[in-house]
Amino acid sequence: MNIILIGPQASGKGTMAQRIEEEFGWPQISMGKLLRKEAGKNTKEGKWIGKLINSGIIVPSRLTTKILLGRLEKKDCIKGFQLDGYPRNIDNFRELKRYLAKKGETIGLVFFLRLSKKTAIRRLGSRIQCKKCERIYNTITLKPKRRGVCDRCGEKLIQRVDDRPKAIAKRFKLFRKQTMPIIKLLKKEYKIAEINAEVNVEKEYTQIRKTIKSALHASGAFT
């Protein structure tokens, strides 16, 4: 199954995608992670991407699409994938549709993680991430077992530059302007499950898990 997780920053897309991958096996394709990987390269393009990310500015559509489609060609995506943070605008959406149509595929489920601006700002200010495996934690809602240390790999937890106040405000504004219009287009073509992201991690994932299992039963994947 191919899945899209869409929602504002701090709505839990990354955490939910990690849970889905652990339970169902479909790889999490995080646009943010792909871009940060590119930004870490010592190239002109990589440095430019890094500057945009740290300023809370969305990377141009042509570039994000090129990076994403290259990732979708890898073998682990053959049986399905999850898109976390893509599409971010209408151009992204159209490019994704064209790509899937050529392969005779489509999107099975779209999750819209609904979250208020107030909650997003509060959560992002408390979000920390492993510098090695990039697992996400939150000092309010999802604390690591040991303070400042990743549960998975034991590396140090840090706050990303784009999770600081000015960048947060910019990213939320861009989400409402560029990404919200995609929801209307998605509703016309795919089944959208609206998820209440104001709740804690366990309750949020319970909503998603139930929807996925229901879709798999309906498709005959579960007997």
Image (spheres, rainbow, N blue to C red):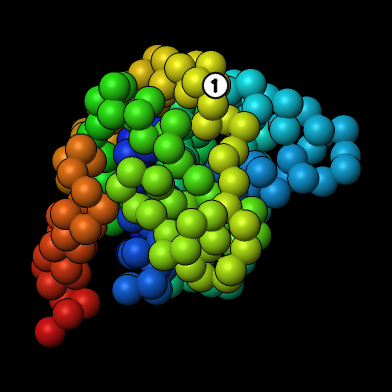
97 is higher (above) or lower (below) than 22: above
Q: 50 or 151: nearer the eye?
A: 151
Q: 150 or 18: nearer the eye?
A: 150
Residue 68 appears left or right of 223: right
Quarter of the image with the C terminus is bottom left
Residue 81 appears left or right of 156: left
Q: Secondary structure at mark 1?
A: helix
Mark 1 neighbour class, 10 Å CA radius: few under 14, some 14 to 19, many 20 or more:
some
Rendered residue at 70%/49% (across/down):
37
Rendered residue at 44%/31% (across/down):
125
Q: Which residue is mark 1?
A: 167
What is the x, y in percent for residue 144? 43, 59
* Quarter residue 97 falls in: top left
Rendered residue at 33%/73% (across/down):
24
32 is higher (above) or lower (below) than 89: below
Query: Residue type at mark 1?
Result: Ala
